[in-house]
């Protein structure tokens, strides 16, 4: 909470997620619930066309 998503990268069977300010998290999955102009969704599937 209170962090801005920057990027993610798959590493083996985990996903590493990076936020501005230096915070990083590791998990099994990443669920992108960051709205219509999702930074999470745009990386693997491309930007949503309007």
Image (spheres, helix red, strand yellow):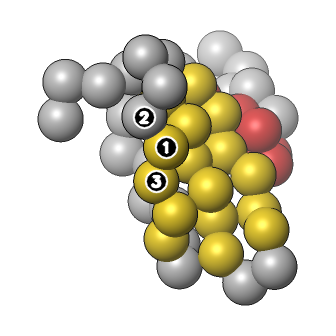
The residue depicted at 48 percent of the width and 18 percent of the height is 20
Residue 28 against residue 17 in the figure, above or below: below
Q: Is residue 26 visible?
A: yes
Which residue is denoted by mark 3 in the rendering? 25
**Disc 3 versus disc 1: distance between alpha carbons?**
4 Å
At x 66% / y 45%, what residue is drawn? 8
The residue pinned by badge 2 equals 23
Which residue ends up furthest to the left in the rendered image?
1
Crowd tier of the residue under label 3, counting other residues whose Cα lies within 10 Å: few below 14, some 14–19, many 20 or above: few
Mark 1 residue crowding within 10 angstroms, few (<14) / some (14–19) / many (20+): some
Q: How many marks?
A: 3
Q: Position of residue 19 (x, y in %)?
A: 48, 29
- The quadrant of the image that shows the C terminus is top right
Q: CA distance from mark 2 to mark 3?
A: 7 Å
Labels 2 and 1 touching (C-beta < 8 A): yes
Horizontal side of residue 32 vs 12, given as left or right? left
Q: Are marks 3 and 1 in contact (CB under 8 Å)?
A: yes
Identify residue for label 1: 24
Q: Is residue 41 left or right of residue 1?
A: right
Q: Considering the numbered disc 1 on the image, is that residue within a helix, a strand or a loop? A: strand
- Badge 2 marks a residue whose secondary structure is loop
Quarter of the figure with residue 35: top left
Mark 3, secondary structure of its residue: strand
């Amino acid at each position: 909470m209170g962090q801005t998503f920057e990027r993610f990268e798959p590493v083996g069977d985990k996903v590493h997620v990076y936020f501005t300010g230096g915070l990083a998290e590791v998990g099994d999955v990443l669920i992108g619930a960051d709205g219509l102009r999702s930074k999470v969704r745009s990386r693997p599937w491309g930007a949503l066309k309007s």
